[in-house]
Image (spheres, rainbow, N blue to C red):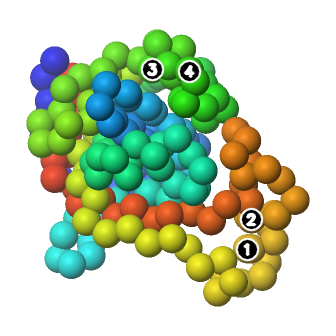
Amino acid sequence: MQRKKIIVADYAKNILEALPKGILLTSKAGDRVNSMTIGWGTLGIEWSTPIFVAFIREHRFTRELLDKNPEFTVNIPFGEFNKKILGVCGSKCGRNLDKIAEAGLTLVDSEMVSVPAVKELPLTLECKIVYQQKQDLPALFEDYRTKCYPQDVDGSAVGANRDAHIAYYGEIVSAYILE
């Protein structure tokens, strides 16, 4: 598999347009690999460094993996792809299910991190976590808090959204398109 190296800024529009429709964040700890559909994130420069910030809720399996191994890949559709991938990775929990197999994903070794890229979503950002912070929900405007963090649901259920997010700031250490 070939990698076409890219400058992240040249593909910022592609990344930011794909994000609200769903992209994958892949994490790995030990022999467990998990891909999770995300629709929230930011791309920018902080500390004079290209950064992707991923927002992961406290009780997600992905959070457990990120806390064990502070690296992740961001896997973005580029061209045609099977939308079932985003459905599987966004509606099922990886604690008790191998979402990689369920979604039919092909993992590709990364260049700079221990977490694999995903062939089917080939625009890839390899990230190393340089900072993380849990959101302070009482500091959030009430409209957002009420809409995005209702407290009348079980935070551990798939699709539950009562939990605060942890913002994981990933330094983008490599970026490419798998060809």
Q: CA distance from mark 1 to mark 4?
A: 32 Å
Seen at 27% across and 72% down, the residue is 45
Residue 34 in picture, x, y percent from top left: 44, 31
Structural crowding at the residue carrying mark 4, measured as other residues with C-alpha within 10 Å and reported as few (<14), some (14–19) or many (≥20): few
Residue 166 in picture, x, y percent from top left: 50, 64
- Looking at the rendered structure, the kind of residue marked 3 is Ile
Q: CA distance from mark 1 to mark 3?
A: 32 Å
Residue underneath mark 3: 100
Select label 1 or label 3 by which is in front: 3
Callout 1–callout 3 Cβ contact below 8 Å: no
> Earlier along the polypeptide chain: callout 4 or callout 2?
4
Q: CA distance from mark 2 to mark 1?
A: 8 Å
Callout 2–callout 1 Cβ contact below 8 Å: yes
Residue 120 in picture, x, y percent from top left: 38, 22
Seen at 19% across and 70% down, the residue is 49
Q: CA distance from mark 3 to mark 2?
A: 28 Å
Select label 4 or label 2 by which is in front: 4
Structural crowding at the residue carrying mark 2, measured as other residues with C-alpha within 10 Å and reported as few (<14), some (14–19) or many (≥20): some
> Relative to 30, is 158 on the left or the right?
right
Q: Residue 97: which numbered mark, if any? A: 4
Query: Measured along the vertical axis of the image, is residue 90 above or below residue 108?
Result: below
